[in-house]
Amino acid sequence: MLQMNIPIPEGLPQSLKMSEAEFAKEARMLLATKLYELGKITAGVASQIAGVDRLVFLASLSKYGVPAINIKDEEVGLEIESARRLAEL
């Protein structure tokens, strides 16, 4: 997996009342959450970035105000129509 180094101001984790390990974990989760929210990556890829299981990632999204189901507005209508057709069968 590709690695990144991001410069962080000295003392930032401590000012947030976090250890460096906690800060790194939170930063990974925030990056994964935002990319997922924007529809740039899947939940599976996001969970890899965050370093957690996919279900753990999806369950943690509510903490950041992000819905676990990432569906575009135009797709909602198509999903509803598909469900109606299936219900008629």
Image (cartoon, rainbow, N blue to C red):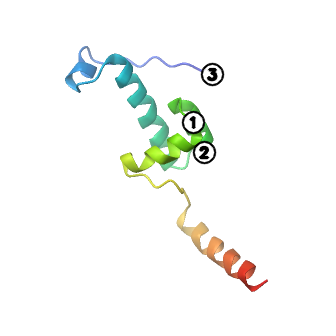
Q: Residue furthest top?
A: 10
Residue 53 got which mark?
1
- Seen in the picture, residue 30 relative to 14 is either above or below; the reply is below
**Disc 3 from disc 1: Cα separation:** 16 Å
Q: Residue furthest left?
A: 15
Q: Say which amino acid is labelled 2.
A: Thr
Look at the numbered disc 1 and give the secondary structure of its residue: loop
Label 1 neighbourhood size at 10 Å, few (<14), some (14-19), many (20+)?
A: some
Residue 42 got which mark?
2
Residue 41 rendering spot, x and y as whole percentages = 58, 43
User: Is residue 45 in view?
Assistant: yes
**Image point (62%, 76%), residue name:** 80
Residue 85 rendering spot, x and y as whole percentages = 73, 81
- Seen in the picture, residue 79 relative to 35 is either above or below; the reply is below
**Image point (58%, 70%), residue name:** 76
Residue 87 rendering spot, x and y as whole percentages = 71, 81
Location of residue 12 by image quarter = top left
Q: Nearer the viewer, residue 54 or 35?
A: 54
- Seen in the picture, residue 86 relative to 37 is either above or below; the reply is below
Label 3 neighbourhood size at 10 Å, few (<14), some (14-19), many (20+)?
A: few
Q: Are marks 3 and 2 in contact (CB under 8 Å)?
A: no
Mark 2 or mark 1: which comes first in sequence? Answer: 2
Location of residue 30 by image quarter = top left
**Image point (40%, 23%), residue name:** 24
Q: Say which amino acid is labelled 1.
A: Asp
Q: Say which amino acid is labelled 3.
A: Met
Q: Nearer the viewer, residue 84 or 55?
A: 55
Look at the numbered disc 2 and give the secondary structure of its residue: loop
Dot 3 corresponds to which residue? 1
**Disc 3 from disc 2: Cα separation:** 16 Å
